[in-house]
């Protein structure tokens, strides 16, 4: 029976249990396939509530450390043989993937620009709801910046951004994402596209870059502009397939393990360690981790990023404030491993920071003053309610029995699977004629193939529930 001491802990009990079990799995104290106590017996033995145990187990399941068997219980996933921080020869072997990007506010540039100008409902874009932006707080902070930071506003920003914003982001990552980095490792830029261009210069345009397929088409266009060899790796239910990265002879893997766009897949622990081992097996391999949509986890705490388990400085972490605030505030950032951060300062420090000091100081105060965390919590509750309402429309409307949804606990979109004999293009085309824009999953295959899947993206962040209810009737008629 698992027994832990709960004295002198400084975090929620479920997080403590989660971390203890996770460490016991990683160090081998809990063996692959070993059955864990039931929620009730674990709670009784440790004098805690079953809800607390359930929350810890759910987090471990969502990250792939545990799996369940119906009516049998909870078991330890097999992540043995995945050695972290050491060089290995060849590709790693994984015995199963466990339970089953980018600044993407213009996802519709994957489609041809032939949409009906009289759009009634656009499900192809995932912009945030403008009514949720904290204008009053933002305006108050801006006035304070003008009155208190006049000297700083007139002083050129360092290449990586002002120290106040980098320190605020480091603090946010520590408290919200569970990763500890130095502010000196953080580089601020106006949008992820700009940061990608810096990375190409830093890592080298002569390297082979590999992205997920399906994936974010705009990323491949950026690589193409720099004459970078960009290749595509197929995915399974656990994310990018490591053998595919090897097959492409890649040096850099550009992935979104927490919430992949467009499939929504969250990469489980076993696959994460396998990807890390791929990077560790050669001295010049790196992983670019786009932590797309990481803030919007529906249940439990956000999934820890790949960076949090990187022991050899091979993960470059990228995130943006475009989804959590607004796309018009073009502020993104990346966290470089210490060695790459030092190289960046040696080679690329002549660049000017592309974000104005005014916006940097404002965002720094917004984060450090606790406003950003409150804003994220408010958004999460709002989107949870909207997602439930959207799913209820599908469960009770005219598509009932004619569709299914593929979703997980993260992000602001899900996949709608339609039971129809029509091709993806036929469905999209007919819906456009009715004023509904929708993207098919097949629109995001990067290798030029056309694979009808019957799966369509529902971006629900900025749609009206009643409009969606009406759209369901049209979709039902079309299919």
Image (spheres, rainbow, N blue to C red):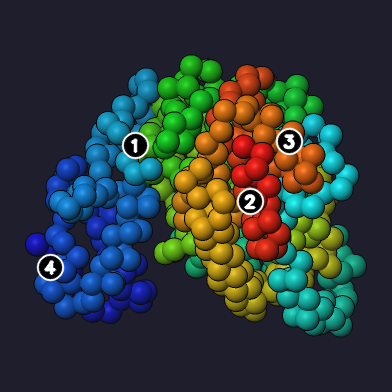
Expressed as whole percent of the image width and height from the top left, the position of residue 161 reads: 74, 58
Residue 204 visible in this rendered orientation of the protein: no
Expressed as whole percent of the image width and height from the top left, the position of residue 436 reads: 75, 46
Taking depth in this image into account, of 264 and 276 the one nearest to the observer is 264
Q: Quadrant of residue 463?
A: bottom right
Residue position for label 4: 41
Expressed as whole percent of the image width and height from the top left, the position of residue 44 reads: 13, 74
Horizontal relation, residue 118 to residue 216: left or right: right
**Marks 2,3: beta carbons within 8 A:** no
Q: Measure how far apart labels 4 and 2 are at the Cα level.
A: 45 Å
Expressed as whole percent of the image width and height from the top left, the position of residue 12 reads: 35, 74
Residue position for label 2: 472
Neighbourhood count class around disc 3 (C-alpha, 10 Å): few under 14, some 14–19, many 20 upward: some
Neighbourhood count class around disc 1 (C-alpha, 10 Å): few under 14, some 14–19, many 20 upward: many
Whether 79 is drawn above or below 358: the answer is: above
Mark 1: which secondary structure?
A: loop
Q: Measure how far apart labels 4 and 1 are at the Cα level.
A: 28 Å
Q: Which mark is residue 253?
A: none
Label 4 vs 2, first from the N-terminus: 4
Q: Measure how far apart labels 4 and 3 are at the Cα level.
A: 55 Å
Taking depth in this image into account, of 114 and 257 the one nearest to the observer is 114
Label 1 vs 3, first from the N-terminus: 1
Q: Which mark is residue 97?
A: 1
Residue position for label 3: 430
Mark 2: which secondary structure?
A: helix
């Amino acid at each position: 029976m698992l027994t832990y001491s709960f004295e002198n802990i400084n975090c929620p009990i479920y997080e403590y249990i989660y971390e203890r079990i996770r460490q016991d799995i990683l160090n081998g104290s809990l063996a692959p396939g070993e059955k864990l106590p039931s929620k009730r017996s674990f709670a009784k033995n440790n004098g805690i509530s079953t809800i607390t145990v359930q929350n810890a187990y759910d987090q471990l399941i969502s990250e792939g450390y545990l799996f369940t068997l119906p009516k049998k219980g909870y078991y330890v996933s097999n992540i043995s043989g995945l050695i972290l921080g050491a060089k290995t020869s060849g590709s790693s072997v994984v015995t199963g993937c466990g339970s089953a990007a980018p600044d993407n506010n213009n996802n519709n540039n994957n489609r041809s620009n032939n949409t009906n100008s009289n759009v009634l409902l656009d499900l192809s874009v995932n912009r945030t709801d403008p009514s949720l932006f904290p204008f009053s707080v933002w305006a108050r902070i801006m006035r304070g910046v003008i009155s208190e930071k006049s000297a700083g506003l007139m002083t050129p920003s360092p290449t990586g951004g002002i120290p106040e914003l980098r320190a605020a982001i480091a603090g946010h990552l520590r408290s919200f994402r569970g990763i500890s980095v130095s502010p000196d490792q953080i580089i601020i830029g106006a949008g992820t596209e700009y940061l990608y261009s810096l990375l190409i210069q830093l890592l080298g345009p002569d390297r082979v870059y590999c992205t997920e397929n399906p994936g974010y088409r705009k990323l491949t266009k950026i690589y193409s502009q720099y004459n970078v060899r960009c290749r595509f790796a197929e995915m399974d239910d656990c994310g990018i397939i490591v053998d595919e990265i090897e097959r492409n002879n890649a040096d850099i893997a550009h992935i979104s393990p927490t919430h992949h766009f467009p499939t929504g897949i969250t990469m489980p622990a076993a696959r994460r360690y396998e990807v890390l081992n791929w990077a560790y097996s050669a001295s010049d391999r790196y992983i670019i981790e786009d932590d797309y949509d990481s803030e919007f986890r529906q249940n439990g705490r956000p999934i820890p990023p790949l960076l949090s388990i990187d022991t050899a400085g091979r993960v470059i972490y990228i995130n943006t404030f475009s989804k959590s605030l607004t796309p018009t505030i073009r502020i993104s950032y990346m966290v470089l491993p210490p060695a790459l951060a030092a190289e960046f300062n040696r080679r690329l420090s002549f660049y000017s920071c592309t974000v104005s000091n005014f916006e940097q100081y404002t965002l720094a105060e917004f984060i450090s003053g606790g406003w950003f965390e409150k804003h994220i919590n408010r958004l999460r509750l709002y989107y949870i309610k909207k997602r439930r309402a959207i799913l209820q429309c599908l469960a009770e409307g005219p598509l009932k029995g004619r569709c299914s949804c593929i979703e997980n606990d993260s992000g602001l979109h899900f996949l709608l699977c339609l039971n129809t004999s029509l091709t993806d293009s036929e469905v999209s085309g007919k819906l456009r004629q009715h004023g509904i824009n929708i993207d098919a999953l097949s629109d995001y295959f990067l290798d030029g193939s056309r694979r009808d899947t019957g799966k369509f993206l529902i971006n629900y962040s900025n749609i009206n529930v009643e409009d969606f209810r009406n759209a369901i009737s049209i979709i039902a008629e079309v299919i």
